[in-house]
Amino acid sequence: MELPVATVTQHDQWKVESQVFRIYDLFGNLPRNAQSVMIELQRDNHIEYLTRGLRQLPPSFCTLDASRPWLCYWIVHSLALLGESVDDELEHNTIDFLSRCQDPSGGYGGGPGQLPHLATTYAAVNALITVGGDQALSSINRGELYKFLRQMKHPSGGFRMHDGGEIDVRACYTAISVASILNILDDELVHNVGSFILSCQTYEGGISGEPGSEAHGGYTFCGVATMILINQINRLDLPRLIDWLVFRQGKELGFQGRTNKLVDGCYSFWQGGVFPLLQRVRSIIDEQLVLPDAGGHYTTNGTHTSTTSSISEAGESFEGISSHVDDACHSRQEVNFNDIGYNFVKRPIEMEPLFHSLALQQYILLCSQEEKGGMKDKPGLSRDFYHTCYCLSGLSVCQHMWSDEEDSPVLP
């Protein structure tokens, strides 16, 4: 009888596990003081790497010519997470460059004179808001940007990424989040967005980019965040979503983006960042876990037993279940869409984290961090600004998700 032949995917997985476990073995055999040094965040080196990149990039970055607002966002956001700001000259140059990426008819392109695109619009707007100040904020043409968002709106309820472009959950999130943060979100933009995203929740529980595709970590974050911003999070199957999410954290201690895929540091945020959102809707999750039987009596849904016990153990029950959310969804005139996002993050945490935050920090600091500055996908790969941004974002999630007090100290 022939033994089964290992697939390429299996070999790749074994290789990553070997690299990761070798690092963990080394760390575990070090003296305590050496461990402290090895697991320290190389803050100054990260700041130097990021600031140097914002000033000037080498010629090899020409392949990212259509992603230049993203480079600004990844760098500026990473610096903000590290508690660092840029000097006045670099701030002015950043604002000036992003202003030249703004199309006269609304939206931002990947560079000066390029086609306006929802992804680079999201990056540019968030970079400018992170920089802050009158010069940055007044540079955003909100009126023309609103017209651009309306032009990208599709009859399905979703949005196109650009003129003639793809329609997916990422487009929904970038459009809705930009509109929300700029206080231009209204009924026309929100119309049928929830139904489009609901059609993308898969049998696994995660959310795909478009109906019929595979559940994916990036699209799942985008879908959940969008449903929160339009006040329709209760329409998703949240228990099934949680089941899918928690099993994306693997033996390497980091997150994978899809089932049977390799661990990747960027999913520290794309997957890990969903949990702080779910921490604030426990009452809706509890409500979904109780379903009526044939006789009209309410019983715990047996298909979600493991999730039920996890949530039940996470904290005390929360009164005033999701009626305020339901009422808002059914009476659109009562909803001020532009206040939803801000008010949501101010809501109290209703349950403890549902993933191993200390383990994720170990993966980020030992396997994704470059000692000379910057973060990477996994051991053996090179650092880049994208992974630096989302690894640091995931690290921030881990250290702040246990408390909803703004001034509370971060976890070590």
Image (cartoon, rainbow, N blue to C red):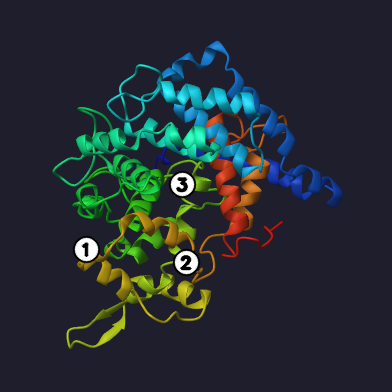
Point out residue 49 in the picture as x, y percentages from the top left corner. Answer: 66, 27
Q: Disc 2 residue type?
A: Arg
Residue 218 seen in this snapshot: yes
**Residue, x 22% and y 83% (percent of image)?**
293
The three-letter code of the residue at mark 3 reads Trp
Tell me: 132 left or right of 144: right
Q: Are marks 1 and 2 in contact (CB under 8 Å)?
A: no
Q: Position of residue 233 (x, y in %)?
A: 32, 61
Q: In the image, is residue 178 above or below residue 198? A: above
Compared across the picture, whether 195 is left or right of 221 comes to left
Residue appearing at x 62%, y 37% in the figure: 79
Assess disc 2: are there few (<14), some (14-19) or many (≥20) residues with their C-alpha within 10 Å of its C-alpha. few
Marks 2 & 3, CB-CB < 8 Å contact = no
**Residue closest to the eye, 362 or 197:** 197
Picture layout, residue 9 above or below residue 305: above
Q: Quadrant of the C terminus?
A: bottom right
Q: Kindly report the distance in space between the C-alpha atoms of the residues bearing marks 1 and 2.
A: 22 Å
Give the residue at mark 3.
270
Q: What kind of residue is marked 1? A: Gln
Q: Which residue is mark 2?
A: 347
Determine the secondary structure under disc 3.
helix
Q: Which residue is mark 1?
A: 333
Residue drawn where x is 50% and y is 71% of the image: 351
